[in-house]
Amino acid sequence: MSSPSKRREMDMMKLMMSDYKVETINDGMQEFFVEFNGPKESLYEGGVWKIRVELPDAYPYKSPSVGFITKIYHPNVDELSGSVCLDVINQTWSPMFDLVNVFETFLPQLLLYPNPSDPLNGEAAALMMRDRPTYELRVKEYCEKYAKAGEGSEDKSSDEDLSEEEYGSGDDEDDDAIAGQPDP
């Protein structure tokens, strides 16, 4: 029984030593937040997200639960709950993987290569397939609004914060390209 516990501690230390900002919840090692930077050369570059990780008792034999606390616009992330649809975490997890894999490979791959055919956010998936430039604009708007580096991202996950920018303030030429506007 101590093996999963030791592995949990080892993986957590490895994650912290990989320069990720990790904040434990209730001073335990089963639930914690990780600051995650959007991958370079992606629509999410420059964004910083707060990710909640929960390790089950059977970790590493059972996959961690991973979810975005900071709002993100992505076909495979549920906009309300932050849940992530990622096969490698949800279905094909192996004890060979660790927490560093989640943050250095799995989540960056998710953001670089969204899969609109298996969505948790149907609106984002439909927009991505129907109107890629508008989808990309919406992703960038969310990054700018919610995932700015150096700001308290946990305060920026409420629906109230996306007001004028999402619905159009009339000050910007790009407002016509925002989703929700009628097609010409």
Image: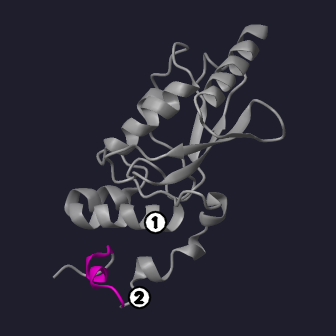
| Whole-percent x, y for residue 56 in the image | 69, 27
| Whole-percent x, y for residue 70 in the image | 57, 56
Q: Is residue 74 visible?
A: yes
Residue at (33% x, 77% y) in the render = 180
| Whole-percent x, y for residue 93 in the image | 50, 21
Q: Classify residue 93 as left or right of residue 108.
A: right
Q: Quadrant of the C terminus?
A: bottom left
Q: Is residue 90 visible?
A: no
Secondary structure type for disc 1: helix
User: Any magenta on residue 163?
Assistant: no
Viewer-proximal residue, 66 or 170? 170
Residue at (31% x, 75% y) in the render = 178
Q: Quadrant of the N terminus?
A: top right
Disc 1 designates what residue? Answer: 144
Tell me, what colour scheme is on the image?
one colour
Viewer-proximal residue, 124 or 105? 105
Secondary structure type for disc 2: loop
User: Any magenta on residue 175?
Assistant: yes
Image-quadrant location for residue 2: top right
Can you tell which mark lies on residue 77? Answer: none
Q: CA distance from mark 1 to mark 2?
A: 16 Å
- Outermost residue on the bottom side: it is 170
Residue at (49% x, 25% y) in the render = 101
Viewer-proximal residue, 55 or 146? 146
**Mark 1, mark 2: which one is toward the viewer?**
1
Give the residue type at disc 1: Glu
Q: Which portion, as a residue range, is magenta?
A: 171-179
Can you tell which mark lies on residue 169? Answer: 2
Residue at (42% x, 58% y) in the render = 73
Q: Earlier in the sequence, mark 1 or mark 2?
A: 1
